[in-house]
Image (cartoon, rainbow, N blue to C red):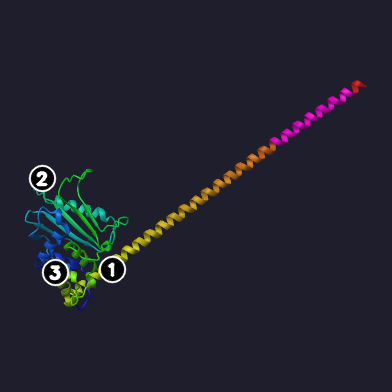
Amino acid sequence: MKHRIDPKVDCVFKALLGTDENRNLLIHFLNAILGNDLFAPITWVEIENPYNEKEFISDKLSIVDVKAKDMQQHLYQIEIQMVNKPYLPERIIYNWADIYSQQLKSGDDYSVLKPTYSIWLLAENLLKKDEDYWHCYKLRDDKGDVLTAGGIWLLELQKFHANLINNEQQRWLQFFKDGEELDDADLPEWMATNEMRQAMNTLTVFSEKERAYFQYQARQEYLREQRTTQKVLQQEQLEKALAVKEKDEALQEKEAALEREKIAQQEKAMAFERERIALAEIQQLKALLAQNVNIHVAENKQGE
């Protein structure tokens, strides 16, 4: 292989699963990932937005998901997400709902609605507090009863680890996670299937054909810019949050200082009041003592 190729880069991903010549790979991938959640194994799909190299290379904002439907008109969406952007969970849910609702045309009733399956491969971890790489979301009640078939699958590739590849699902996940490190001249044993060799051949095309590699490099650069922009925004948000925190802490310290000064003034006033009361009591005692002395003197004179 002339150059290392990452299958997670969107143009490569689209070539792998979004082309007519790799239709069998898409079918194999869907059966591997969805497995028992399907009514029956998928044998045929129609790709609704087939990959077009010329359109893709000229459009930096190209839509990078793969959409397909099977013979029963069940809908499938597969998307690779290299960078976790803000509000990604909301976007994922909205996309699924949008694909599901778009089935209805003018005059259709709800009986035409078919199950919609959405699969998201995430290069970065989204659910930080959950160590599992596999997440399946369905419409169900609190007893576990499913309202409708289909759903949303989130696969966090960084969390996926398998010492031994035991099934096709693990094979695909390992391929997308570590595909950039593979050498087509020395493939590991877990890549020794017809589908994995075909997938690897797609990477080889991007590696050895100049136009395809230029396209790959252009997408890599675009993704780097996205990551850089995302990090800059995150840094700016962090700095802004720290500035707000410092401002709040300074305000709290000022308020605490004012409160301490207020308490000191109150204590000073109380001390002054205690001193005033003490002086008043002393004066009263002096007056009482003087009165007693006068009475005693008067009594002495009368006795004489």
Residue 212: give x, y in percent of width and height.
Answer: 17, 74
In which quadrant is the N terminus drawn?
A: bottom left
Give the residue number, with chain letter if any, for mark 3: 193
Which is more toward the observer, 26 or 11?
26
- Toward the top, the furthest residue is 302
In 3D space, how far apart are the residues under numbered discs 2 and 3 (Cα atoms)? 42 Å
- Find disc 2 in the rendering and name its residue: 110
Prevailing secondary structure of the magenta residues? helix
Q: Which residues are magenta?
A: 277-300
* Residue type highlighted by circle 3: Thr
Disc nearer the start of the sequence (2/1): 2
Q: Residue furthest bottom?
A: 2
The tag earlier along the polypeptide, 1 or 3, is: 3
Q: Is residue 283 magenta?
A: yes
Q: Nearer the viewer, residue 268 or 148?
A: 148
In the drawing, what numbered circle is on residue 224?
Answer: 1
Where is residue 167 shown, x and y percent of the image? Answer: 17, 63
Give the image quarter of residue 123: bottom left
Disc 3 is placed on an element classified as loop
Q: Mark 2 Cα within 10 Å, few/some/many (few <14, many 20+)?
A: few
